[in-house]
Image (tube, rainbow, N blue to C red):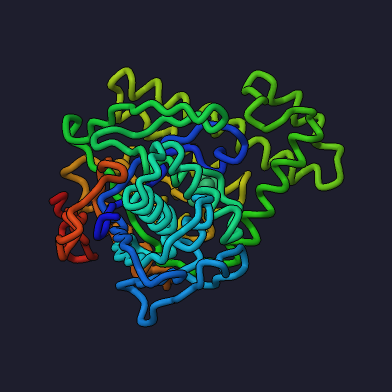
Amino acid sequence: MRESASWLAPGRVNLIGEHTDYNDGFVLPLAIEFGCRATVSPGPDGLLRFVSAQESEPVEVPVEGLAPDGVQGWAAYPAGVLWALGVDLPGLTVTVDSDVPLGAGLSSSAALTCSVAAAANDLLELGLSPRELVAVARKAENGFVGAPTGGMDQLASMLGEAGSVLFCDMRSLDVRPVRFALDDAGLALLVVDSNAPHRHADGEYAARRKACEQAASVLGVSALRDVTLDGLDEALAKLAPEPDGDVLVKRARHIVTENARVTDVVARLDAGQIREIGPLLTASHASMREDFEITVPEVDVLVEALLAAGAHGARMTGGGFGGCVIALVDNDAVAAAVRAAADAAAAHGFAAPRTFVTAPAAGAHAVDPSGAEPPRQPPVDTNASGAPDAG
Ligand code: GLA
């Protein structure tokens, strides 16, 4: 066996298509410049050792103790990946170092699981394809950590491409890179982290998932993906009389309209009409606020402020209940938008947002194990007073 293998896997921003993944629908994420670097090397017999640059204590797990519920905290993610590989494991040391902001809805967990999956696959010479690694990373989260997430994040982290968003059909798992030529259009994609504390995000996520499954079952379809915009009124009329019918109506309406917005955005991007996706992003936010009820005042205020400052479109990205807002902004309006977001948060007594400019980055790739620092180009952070620099 080689001495070690190192892979870098990025976090992600979702341009549009929220909570559609576990409804077999469409999503349009991009990998970002923040990522996790994982190095896997042979370790003492029978022992799995997990070391993180962001944690003070390493975690050690005997190989035979590797089972769901057997590992708690951050190490459950890399341990889950090794478990999900489903092979006899030698002793291994897994070292990770991530600069993906935690709790911001930027998929720090997918960056962690995908980088470990790819590095372990490389070191152990398992020959798994990127798509098989996506499945391993997802199995780790769903089956070991116990997070019922939908699969978009791992696809984006493994398969993301610089310069493109990734159009994913979450039923067939077909993906198609769609050119997202921000520079050519004089545009910037701004990410504004609300820094809002996540409130009951896990329980609410599971509740949304359950409501969608319930709605699909009432409608006699395998997933809400099967309801189209044309059939929406009829479907909602069937859901309304159910117990909790008003909730089911709202949840289903979000998923069906959101799937349509994703395909509309793709059509506009394919036609080179990048600015024209703005209203669809904003409509997605309204749908998440009114129908899916996953936004919080902190992100709603940011969206309004960014739009008032001239953004072409703005929406919360990720699972919700806090996290980040994205905005499509003309390059020369970025500084004003950043200031407007900071001022609005301050005026409401909310935490100061943290803003950066992003663009689609490469998905998981091998990096030099000997390099002390991951060869990344983090987006330049900005603050209320300084103009951001797309770097
Ligand atoms: C989280 C999950 C994803 C997806 C989004 C919402 O990021 O991990 O699978 O469901 O929420 O779109």
Question: Looking at the image, is 387 positioned above or below residue 260?
Answer: below
Q: Residue at x 38, y 72 (%)?
A: 44
Instruction: Determine the image quadrant of residue 133.
Output: top left
Q: Residue at x 61, y 31 (%)?
A: 256
Image-based side of 40 in relation to 128, left or right: left
Does the image show residue 353? no
Q: Position of residue 342 (x, y in %)?
A: 31, 63
Residue sitting nearer the eye, 90 or 217 = 90
Image-based side of 222 in relation to 259, left or right: right
Q: Quadrant of the N terminus?
A: bottom left
Q: Position of residue 218 (x, y in %)?
A: 81, 34
Q: Residue at x 29, y 48 (%)?
A: 32
Question: Looking at the image, is 243 positioned above or below residue 372?
Answer: above
- Give the mark count: 0
Residue sitting nearer the eye, 156 or 339 = 156
Q: Position of residue 233 (x, y in %)?
A: 72, 25
Image-based side of 145 in relation to 308, left or right: right
Q: Residue at x 43, y 55 (%)?
A: 113
Residue sitting nearer the eye, 51 or 85 = 85
Question: Looking at the image, is 173 positioned above or below residue 96?
Answer: above
Residue sitting nearer the eye, 236 or 228 = 228
Q: Residue furthest bottom?
A: 56
Instruction: Determine the image quadrant of residue 165.
Output: top left
Q: Position of residue 137 (x, y in %)?
A: 47, 49
Does the image show residue 340? yes
